[in-house]
Image: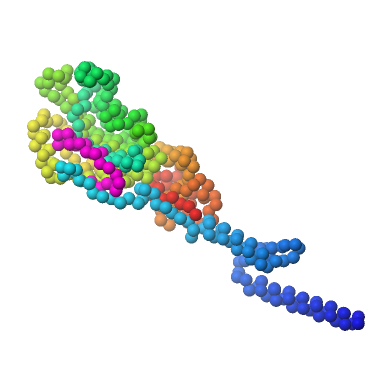
Amino acid sequence: MKKKIIALFLVCIMLLSFTGCGESKKIDSEPDGTPDDTEYSVIGGGQNRSTEESTSQTTDTTETNNNSDANVKVTPTENASITWTSYTTPEGYMTLDIPQGWEVMNLNIDVIGYLLLVYDPNSVGRRFFFSTAVTSYPSQDEWAWWRQTLKEYSGVDYGENWYISPQASTQSLFENSGGFFGYTNFNVIDNLGQNGYGGDVLQATCTLDGINVEGVFSAAVVDMPVQLSPYLADGSMDLVEGTVIMTAPEEEYTNWEGVLGQMFASLTFSDQYWTDRAAMQRQMQQTANYLSYQADVMSDMIMDTWEKRSNSYDIQSQQYSDATLGRERIYDTETGEVYYADNGWSDGYYGNRYQLVTPGSELYNLPVTGTISY
């Protein structure tokens, strides 16, 4: 009897050995690179194969499906998904391309003076303003007379400065013309140089309807003598030519400057406009510097100057906006594009394609063309 028990015990040991060998063979057949220490999960002191497979699969899914390149989603921002449409003024004088959904206001003063305002009704800070020439700017030394006259006729005292240019310069024009152009708190960041037709290109900020905006401001301001005028003390006014204002909210200006520049570059004048304008000019006192540049030439000059600007302010401004709005910027190493992401997105990312834009990087000057998520 004892021999049978011993024999049975030996048979059981042999069966267990064969079972162990079979399981060992299965482990060897797993793909290379599967970590040995994660092959099993220990439950109740024993090895449970089915539980191990479930645990291992969950870990792989988290890393592969949620945080890898293959599962990153990019949603284009407004500035990257624009549909352009052509707009022509009622008289047929001017044509330009504008983003679909934007609205246009224009005012034909006397053919020589023509004002054009293009704006996004969904974002009051996104604006493009252009005027050929405006002659209703009294000089600084004329303002006392104009101020008193307007007060007598309207009952309103417009104060010491109101859309005037005390020193006949681009900067003084915009510093004192907030009431005319509709902004407050004008602040020059940098004078970027000459615009090519007698004025400067300014990088500046201001407030439009309660929104802080950044933009390009440019114009030529010249003294215009008015002879034999019974109304003006020294017979002079300021003529403002080629006024350009392109703005967008500060936190998104780098995204929209290309769109605004493209709009400006598309602005063209008809031959009839120049014919009618020349006829009107012959009826007026000639000045030293009437606007003679086509819009495309002006836009090339202004945008060339703008692209050469010092960008330290822009980088700091965009970094501050990101911190305030709780977001970070991600650079796509394959396409060269920059995207917005929720703050901390890069901390959970396991791939190699997308990189965090670090503080001080020149990449802050690139337009953001989308938002990125999992």
Residue 172 location, x and y as percent? 28, 27
Residue 197 makes an appearance in the image: no
Q: Quadrant of the N terminus?
A: bottom right
Q: Is residue 107 magenta?
A: yes
Name which residue lies at 43% across and 57% down.
Answer: 334
In the figure, 228 relative to 55: above or below?
A: above
Name which residue lies at 22% across and 38% down.
Answer: 106
| Figure quadrant of residue 28 | bottom right
Quick one: 239 or 23, which is closer to the camera?
23
Q: Is residue 56 magenta?
A: no
What is the image's colouring?
rainbow
In the figure, 86 relative to 65: above or below?
A: above
Residue 49 location, x and y as percent? 68, 68
Position of 372 with respect to 292 (left or right) is right
In the image, the segment drawn in magenta is 96-117
Count of numbered circles on the image? 0
| Figure quadrant of residue 19 | bottom right
In the figure, 65 relative to 78: above or below?
A: below
Work out which residue is located at the far right of the displayed protein and give it. 2
Name which residue lies at 10% across and 30% down.
Answer: 284
Residue 121 makes an appearance in the image: yes
Quick one: 369 or 299, which is closer to the camera?
369
Magenta stretch, main secondary structure, is: strand
Name which residue lies at 54% across and 60% down.
Answer: 64
| Figure quadrant of residue 157 | top left
Residue 354 location, x and y as percent? 47, 54
Residue 179 location, x and y as percent? 29, 28
Position of 21 with respect to 217 (left or right) is right
